[in-house]
Image: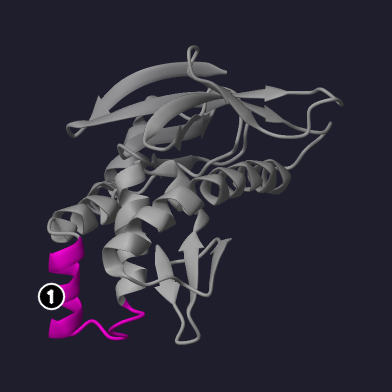
Amino acid sequence: MIKENIVIDGIPITLERKNIKNMYLRVVPPKGEVKVSAPLFLSDEDIYDFIKSRKEWILKKQDLILKNKIKTPLKYTNGEKHSLWGEEYTLQLIKNSKINRAFIDKEKGILYLPVPNRSTIEKREKILNEFYRRELQHAIPSVLSKCGKKVGKQPKEVKVRKMKNWGNCKQNGVITLNLNLAKKKPIFLEYVLIHELCHLIEFNHGKKFKKLMDKFCPNWKKIKKELNE
């Protein structure tokens, strides 16, 4: 394989010449880097002409990635960055039959993930999600007690699962929280709990609900914006 960095029409490109039959072009998150894989037998002119013909597509793809802040898909491999309560850790896979739960070393900034031999991305993701679930479940009681005293309400039950929203509240009094809250700063868990507890008083998002949020979490709009960024 021969690797080089080139610039075509102002676009930086990483070009890799390989023993392959076809040419491939990718625009990679999160910065919109352009990567091209080309057969060894192709001339510079053929490669450059191909890239130029795809210039409009490249620019549109880069714009889409940057505007939507699209991230590189996680593979749960050594060196990846993962967060816990707003702090970033470097993932380190370990194979140890005596350890079956993920854990962190705060001083070294490492999140250790125990994995079985020949583990898949899905399996590693599942193990890490269980770690986040435990972290969130451990944090909930004290934060819920604090928020419950503020709002004057307590839920019937609090569940944790993967979901699109940060939280929801059913009319039967059951609150569900997104396990990804364990990745965020603790203030976001407090905000989401206050939000859902307010739904025990006012079930919709109308004026009365917003007044409750203003009362129990005065800077909730700013927190909400940061959480959703």
Q: Which residue is mark 1?
A: 211
Instruction: Work out whether residue 85 or residue 203 is closer to the camera in this orientation and state it.
Output: 203
Expressed as whole percent of the image width and height from the top left, the position of residue 166 reads 40, 62
Expressed as whole percent of the image width and height from the top left, the position of residue 90 reads 50, 23
In the rendered image, the quadrant that contains the N terminus is top right
Instruction: Work out whether residue 33 or residue 183 is closer to the camera in this orientation and state it.
Output: 183
Q: At 40% from the left edge and 51% from the top edge, which residue is drawn?
A: 143
Q: Seen from this angle, which residue lies furthest top? A: 108
Asked which quadrant contains residue 153, the reply is bottom left
Expressed as whole percent of the image width and height from the top left, the position of residue 183 reads 44, 42
Query: Looking at the image, what colour scheme do you see?
Result: one colour
Disc 1 residue crowd, few under 14, some 14–19, many 20+, Cα 10 Å: some
Q: At 33% from the left edge and 40% from the top edge, which residue is drawn?
A: 51
User: Dot 1 lies on which element?
Assistant: helix
Q: Is residue 96 above or below residue 63?
A: above
Asked which quadrant contains residue 41, the reply is top right
Q: At 50% from the left edge and 44% from the top edge, which residue is drawn?
A: 73
Expressed as whole percent of the image width and height from the top left, the position of residue 23 reads 50, 40
Instruction: Report the span colored magenta.
Output: 199-216
- Image-based side of 59 in relation to 83, left or right: left
Magenta highlight on residue 145? no
Magenta highlight on residue 209? yes
Q: Is residue 137 visible?
A: yes
